[in-house]
Amino acid sequence: MLTVIEALAAIEKYSLPLPAESILLGEALGRVLAEDALADCDSPPHDKAMMDGFAVRVADGVNQRRIVETIFAGTVPTVAVGMDEASRIMTGAPLPVGADAVVPIEVVTLRDELFVTPHSAPVVGKHMQRRGDNFRRGDAIVRAGQPLRSAEIAALAEIGVAEPRCFPEPRVAVLATGDELVSPNQVPAAGQIRNSNGPMLCAAVREAGAAPIDLGVGRDEPAHLREKLLEGLTADVLLVSGGVSAGDKDLAPGLLVELGVEQIFHKIAMRPGKPLWFGRGPANPNGRRPLVFGLPGNPASSFVCFQLFVRPLLSGLSGGGFQGLVPQRVELAMAYDFRGERETYVPAKLSITGATPTRWRSSGDLSGLVGAEVLLTFPPGDHQYAAGTELIALALPK
Ligand code: AMP
Ligand code: MG
């Protein structure tokens, strides 16, 4: 059995970004930029007014000026401003030749709309911005590896990168297995339960910025399951839930190996999540070898394994580096009696007094995960933890 750290190291080897592609800026939110985006223009592209008012020569002091033209944003000046002259100018419009300051409309006296007098002597460069003051043509404005949020999308738009080169969203096939599973809109008959792992994994894939492909439920029947797995192996990542432990109908690992998937590890010394299986499939039609997780069927185990192991892999494939849940130090808000011989991840809520484990009964208990903000990490070994003990907590996605 691997430790959590060993398993992460094994997975990290396969977490290089998928080949970059060009996508429309309007679809790039959340993607990671694959190459530096360089400015194709100066910003601003011209000396520009930052206020509505008058473009003036500072040398003329508080003299009255004759108004020679009006310059709107989107137009260009046609005459230079000479001695005791000014141009009416709107915010964003290019400054005329000769002007070296803008005087806002609020601090001038106008006569007949023909003459203007500033209330005080203008200052060079005031209420205007010089060409290239923000950045210059050729500057790298957004760097490779930067996740694109609204601010970066705006910057790319300004510099004309309408189809940025980004790492793709990994396509993640999700297959829940088990003869006992019915869909959430059905009333389970005797012996049946609803499929919660399918919806959880599809949502978790989305939370991780990847694209789920829901393959529904696979029955515990070899021929049928083989077909479903084959379909899943065309994705970048295949998540199979259930059927990975030691039961008579735990068919997934055997079938995966039959289909040419190379097992990299099986079983981890942790709770919940011990039966985790990881492997690498044969090259699919786009020439890439899909990565395959056999996640434990127990819902809390599946959830924790996704967050601990699948999430960093998806981050790596998406170009964001092998980033897992962010660890933080927290204090226990209450005394806690821990028993277990494996490293254990316990869902907890945070408050000003520290972390409080939820009422969480077993690896099958989803109710204990509802509203949980962190997974508290307990090292193996029975121990009475006093209130105030410092532990490592992994922050769950918001
Ligand atoms: P397995 O790994 O297939 O032996 O399943 C372990 C436990 O998880 C069993 O109690 C299953 O009924 C349960 N289980 C398996 N798959 C799911 C699922 N998709 N949703 C909810 N529970 C599941
Ligand atoms: Mg099963």
Image (spheres, rainbow, N blue to C red):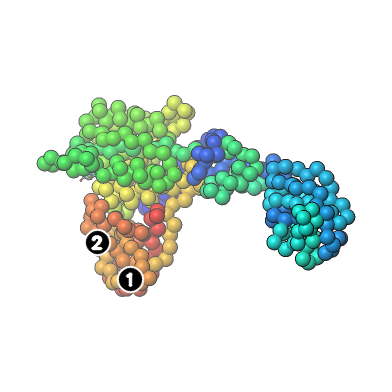
SS at mark 2 in the image: loop
Sequence-first disc among 1 and 2: 1
Give the side of residue 212 with respect to residue 367, left or right.
right
- Whether residue 245 appears in this view of the structure is no
Which residue is rendered at x = 29% and y = 55% of the image?
Answer: 370
Ligand 1 has an atom within 8 Å of the beta carbon of the residue at disc 1: no
Most extreme residue toward the left is 190
| Front residue (pair 388, 85) | 85
SS at mark 1 in the image: loop
- Whether residue 60 appears in this view of the structure is yes
For the C terminus, the quadrant is bottom left
Q: Is residue 166 above or below residue 362?
A: above
Which residue is rendered at x = 30% and y = 47% of the image?
Answer: 302
Q: Where does residue 217 sit, x and y in percent of width and height?
A: 26, 35
When asked about the image quadrant of residue 33, the answer is top right
| Front residue (pair 384, 186) | 186
Identity, as a three-letter code, of the amino acid under mark 2: Arg
Residue that mark 2 sits on: 359
When asked about the image quadrant of residue 83, the answer is bottom right
Which residue is rendered at x = 47% and y = 28% of the image?
Answer: 287
Q: Where does residue 202 sit, x and y in percent of width and height?
A: 35, 42
Q: Is residue 331 above or below residue 256?
A: below
Give the side of residue 46 with respect to residue 304, left or right.
right
Q: Is residue 122 above or below residue 197?
A: below
Q: How many C-alpha atoms fall within 10 Å of the one at disc 1: few (<14), some, or many (≥20)?
A: many
Mark 1–mark 2 distance (CA, rounded to whole Å): 14 Å
Labelled disc at residue 333: 1
Which residue is rendered at x = 35% and y = 32% of the image?
Answer: 232
Identity, as a three-letter code, of the amino acid under mark 1: Ala
Q: Where does residue 19 sit, x and y in percent of width and height?
A: 53, 35
Most extreme residue toward the front is 112
When asked about the image quadrant of residue 326, the answer is bottom left
